[in-house]
Image (cartoon, grey):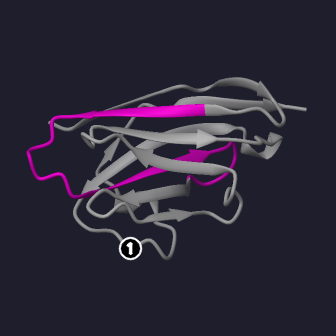
Amino acid sequence: QVQLVDSGGGSVQAGGSLRLSCAASGYTYYSRRCMAWFRQAPGKEREDVAHIYTGDGDTYYADSVMGRFTISQDNAKTTLYLLMNNLKPEDTAMYYCAAHTGWCGTWSPFSSADFDYWGQGTQVTVST
């Protein structure tokens, strides 16, 4: 049973930084999978902020976070990170780690329906 545990959210002022973590467990040795960070603000759809194919490290970023957020994984490929710099009030949302086994393209965003496994979410609040 695959489990994802999100952590690292909090409240910061605009311009600040946070690093989210997602600890993955329950995978078999086959480590090539697609992992993503989604976010959902009140009244809005869940959106793909960034995703990474763990096989080769290729990444995708939404235009709204390009140049400010960095998605990465540890060498063991068991922990996913999202470093968020220069945070803005519009980044306020619940952030979720997600994963599915297999290859993923990095030229466009995914729908939440494309992912099989989810973390519980971690709240990020950015104030002016």
Extreme left residue here? 29
Q: Is residue 57 left or right of residue 11?
A: left
Extreme front residue here? 75
Q: Residue at x 27, y 38 (%)?
A: 78
Q: Secondary structure at mark 1?
A: loop
- Mark 1 Cα shell of 10 Å, populated few (<14), some (14-19), many (≥20): some
Asked if 7 appears above or below 111 in the picture, the reply is above
Percent from the top left, x then y, of residue 16? 77, 32
Q: Residue at x 24, y 39 (%)?
A: 76
In depth, the one of 53 and 113 nearer the eye is 53
Q: Is residue 43 magenta?
A: yes
Q: Residue at x 11, y 53 (%)?
A: 30
Q: Is residue 67 left or right of residue 128?
A: left
Q: Which residues are magenta?
A: 19-46
Residue annotated with mark 1: 105
Q: Is residue 79 magenta?
A: no
Percent from the top left, x then y, of residue 25? 21, 33
